[in-house]
Image (tube, grey):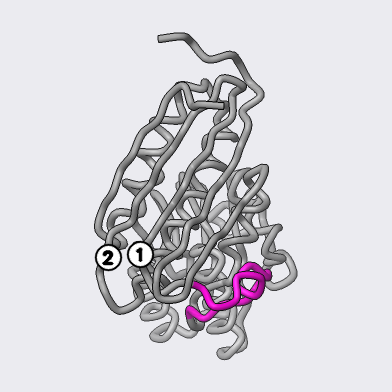
Amino acid sequence: MKPINEMNVSFFSRSSNEGFARAAVAAFAAQLDPTVDELSEIKTAVSEAVTNCIVHAYRDTIGIIYIKAQIYEDGRLVIRVRDKGCGIENVEQAMEPMFTTGGEERSGLGFTVMQNFMDRVRVLSHVGKGTVVTLYRTLESRPVGND
Amino acid sequence: MGVRLTLREGTLTALLSGEIDHHCAKGIREEVDKAAGQTKPRRLVLDFSRVQFMDSSGVGLIMGRYKLMQSIGGIVILANLPEKIEKIVALAGLDRLARIERNWDHETNQ
């Protein structure tokens, strides 16, 4: 199935862009007429994925984060957050609740939050090449307009 | 993002506002820790009534303040959590580390 709408945005992995990234995706997702709760959960999941790129993928450097968001006719929202950073050696371990390599002030709950707030989370990573996190969420609420 | 700190009768209250993410967690942490280090309160109240957004960076922030308060023999109270933020707090099991108060009045500290 082809998406009926798509947006792409890329930006430097500066922490000041975390707010921008989740607001951009939320503004795009708004055309699916989500509830306040749905929108808040989407923003939180995007914030987690983007923060991972900044804190882990591009740890001591500044790289580019790419977000692609797509809307499908059946109300499905697919958000892909991609980086060309260090990659994750052990994805399974990284997704375990409370596991973190981010130090004391990181909770290790990023992937747990994504999994709780989205229908499905897919992670593809290659060490030295980067990571793609894809977030899937179907918005039940109301049908999409045709424009 | 802002934090307004008040100290009254051994209770340090941090009235947080705006969005809590990784970007602004550091600033909040520094302000709260500085005040707590100087005043050594018995209770640290983190008041979320004016917080519009929080991701897991906020969980790390709460866990860190819990450890800090534990080290000086005090407790952490999470006050006035909006429903969507309480969801993350529960997911992280923070209700086991901190007291949750839904109707906290910072005028009377209860």
Residue A22: % across, % down: 41, 45
Compare residues A69 and A42 and report the one nearer the observer: A69
The number of numbered discs placed on residues in the rendered structure image is 2
Residue A67 covered by magenta stretch: no
Image point (60%, 61%), residue name: A111
Q: Eyeballing the image, is B90 above or below A134?
A: below
- Tag 1–tag 2 contact (CB < 8 Å): yes
Image point (58%, 74%), residue name: B63
Residue A19: % across, % down: 35, 49
Residue A95 covered by magenta stretch: yes
Dot 2 alpha-carbon crowd within 10 angstroms: few under 14, some 14 to 19, many 20 or more:
some
Farthest residue to the bottom: give it.
B71
Q: Chain of mark 1?
A: A
Q: Secondary structure at mark 1?
A: loop
Which residues make up the magenta segment?
A88-102
Compare residues A137 and B94 and report the one nearer the observer: A137
Farthest residue to the front: give it.
A1
Image point (35%, 76%), residue name: A59
Q: Is residue B12 visible?
A: yes
Sequence-wise first label, 1 or 2: 2
Q: Which residue is mark 1?
A: A84
Q: CA distance from mark 1 to mark 2?
A: 7 Å
Q: Eyeballing the image, is A21 above or below B75?
A: above
- The quadrant the N terminus of chain A occupies is top right
Three-letter code for the amino acid on which mark 1 is drawn: Lys
Q: Are marks 1 and 2 on the same chain?
A: yes
Three-letter code for the amino acid on which mark 2 is drawn: Gly
Residue A147 occupies quadrant: top left
Q: Secondary structure at mark 2?
A: loop
Q: Which residue is mark 2?
A: A63
